[in-house]
Amino acid sequence: VSFKYFNILFFYILFIQSSHAIECSAWTRDENKNLKIENVTLSDLETNKFFSGKYFKIVLDKSETAVSLDDANLSVRACTLYYHLTLARNYFLEQFSDTYLKKLKPITIRIEMPYSFIDSSHYMHEDFKSYNNSLTIPPSNNNKLDTITSWDFEIWFAPAKKIKIDNSVEQAAKLLGSSTAQESLRLGVFSTTASNFVTQLAQGMTVTSFEGKLHVQSLLLSLSIVTFTPWLIEKFAALAKRTVYLDTALIPEVIYHEFAHIALSKHLKLTHHSPIVEGMANYFAVAVGNSPAILHKTKSFARGLDKLKVSKDIKYESWMEDQKYAQYGFVLALLGEIKKQLGNTNADKLIYHAHTKLNASSSVAVDLTKAIQESAREIFSPEEQKIILLKLTSIWQNRSL
Ligand SMILES: [Zn+2]
């Protein structure tokens, strides 16, 4: 071996050895799906000092420096996130040998992140605070102002805080009724975006003022970004008078849900909140954790919220197509029945393939059912197809599709 190659080999070995395995405490689920604190190993950190590795970097709110392993306040939170994000990534790579995921740059994870997202300046004015929520944001695009540093995929976990939901609904309504908001809405923003705006405000934000020079259209677009908002207003107003509390960063399937958004984002874009986008993310979130529901046995980490069950007998109704009800459990229950009928392996393969034929504006009744049937024809043998298509037809009938 020449000296030159020896040198390359030497640096290659040095590079391999540069990822560190460390142990830390994380919230995980035991065999009975109860949450518990457990010692876990993280194997791809760059150093043994910070939660920063090959695929993820965990930071506190707007900081660019990774959280320290010794940080007494944040290390359990950071460890929990790093651990479950790695599990989710491995799931997608192992099940679907996902080339899209392999090419992604490291993802920045912001914890205790109280600010909201806007695509022009990355962080919204500090008056716009967000709680009890998590969201996945796409890389910066043409809407970004020149003075702002560009960013890649990020996942934000807002602080958990007890909030009376009726109060925030009231605030959102008041905001929409204000002259500034009315004027903004007349600037040609579509009514669906506007109603989505109110929903989002009611679900996750406390609005203290409507000041600051925000680009209104950009604001409205940014607010339609995918978020984890498992409760609904309007349709279920009677349920709305309750205290809501959600510590998103400590609940495994919420973490899987956000990662699934990134894994599926080549086709299901992150700039649209829709029943297909949320239903698919929920389906893969329960697939990674093999859990019976989203927000199942969440102990003291969630209050006042309904869990989304995989096995639930919900019949289709046309209002379920509305993006306002993106987190309504119909799509999860429908895909869950496919899982029950076809078995985990076939269902996961089928539904993953189907997502490549869909986008955020696809409908449940027409596009989703069609994409699943077409996928069955493409990936299964003729004999298997026959049985699977029969099963699918009976599922559609069962669900009034
Ligand atoms: Zn989501």
Image (tube, rainbow, N blue to C red):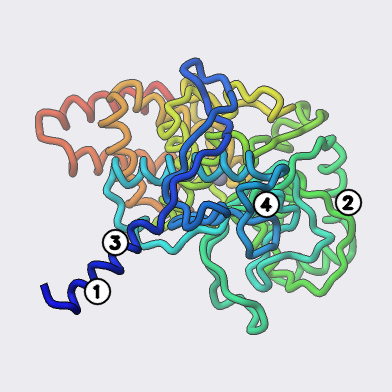
Between the residue at mark 4 and the residue at mark 2, the CA separation in whole angstroms equals 15 Å
Q: Nearer the viewer, mark 3 or mark 2?
A: 3
Give the mark nearest the N terminus, 3 or 1: 1
* Residue annotated with mark 4: 196
Q: Which of 215 and 66 is in front in this view?
A: 66
**Where's the C terminus, which quadrant?**
top left
Under circle 2, the secondary element is helix
Q: Does any portion of residue 48 appear in the rendered image?
A: yes
The residue that appears at 27% across and 24% down in the rendered structure is: 391
Between the residue at mark 4 and the residue at mark 3, the CA separation in whole angstroms equals 52 Å
The residue that appears at 18% across and 41% down in the rendered structure is: 379
- Contact (Cβ within 8 Å) of mark 3 with mark 2: no
Q: Nearer the viewer, residue 141 or 396?
A: 141
Give the mark nearest the N terminus, 1 or 2: 1
Amino acid type for the residue under numbered disc 2? Lys
* Residue annotated with mark 3: 13
Give the mark nearest the N terminus, 4 or 1: 1
- Contact (Cβ within 8 Å) of mark 4 with mark 2: no
Between the residue at mark 4 and the residue at mark 1, the CA separation in whole angstroms equals 58 Å
Amino acid type for the residue under numbered disc 4? Asn
Point out residue 160 in the picture as x, y percentages from the top left corner.
74, 40
Give the mark nearest the N terminus, 3 or 2: 3
Q: In which quarter of the image is residue 305?
A: top right
Examine the rendered structure and indicate whether residue 175 appears above or below residue 217: above
Residue located farthest toward the bottom when viewing the structure as drawn: 146
* Residue annotated with mark 1: 7
The residue that appears at 79% across and 39% down in the rendered structure is: 161
* Residue annotated with mark 2: 174
